[in-house]
Image (cartoon, grey):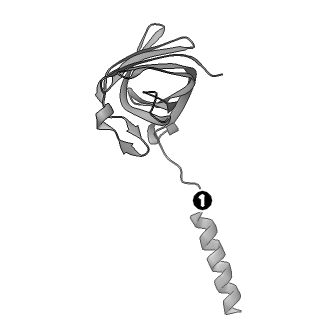
Amino acid sequence: MKRTVFILVAIAAALVSCDKIESDKPLEESAVRSDSLFYSGTLLANASSGDCTTPDMKVSINLTFKSDSVSISLFKAKLAQRMPAMDIVIPNITMKKEADVTLLTSVRAVPLAMGNEFPAYTVTGFNGRINGDSLNFSLSFGSTPTSFNGKIIK
């Protein structure tokens, strides 16, 4: 009998602890939300060893709401002919909405690839724009001028 009462008390305690916790703040204020926009296009890197084009490359712009910066992920990008394709993340890109265009800028950012920072390929002079369904940007990865032109994936 004592064992049955103990089990019933334990179940009641478990049910009480599972009650939904209410917050006075709406979701937008109590949590940071994020989303991504995906584009497909062509990446052109003007490497010292020759131009390297990555056609049909996927790019995502990773938005964090309540922030004026984004990160941009380049999937299977190549910056030189002999370089293996790799995923590259460019953090801390400033995003600013002006009329019908969204401007993307960064003076300097250290990109991430394969879980590590790549200071030898520090991004400088990042300038881009989202206009309708189009994404265009230019930058330098180290000493390699690079550009991307693409359209949103729907």
Vertical comparison of 39 with 13: above or below: above
For disc 1, the marked residue is 19
Can see residue 104?
no
Residue 95 place in picture, x, y as percent: 39, 21
Secondary element at image label 1: loop
Residue at image position (45%, 7%) is 99
Outermost residue, top side: 99
Q: How many marks?
A: 1
Is disc 1 surrounded by few (<14), some (14 to 19) or many (20+) residues within 10 Å?
A: few
Residue 16 place in picture, x, y as percent: 60, 66
Quadrant of image for the N terminus: bottom right
Vertical comparison of 122 with 40: above or below: below
Can see residue 6?
yes
Residue at image position (64%, 85%) is 6
Residue 78 place in picture, x, y as percent: 47, 29
Outermost residue, bottom side: 1
Q: Decide which of 123, 135 is in the foreground and name it.
A: 123
- Name the residue type under label 1: Asp
Q: Decide which of 105, 102 is in the foreground and name it.
A: 105
**Does residue 36 appear to the left or right of 50 in the view shown?**
right
Quadrant housing residue 41: top right
Residue 154 place in picture, x, y as percent: 66, 22
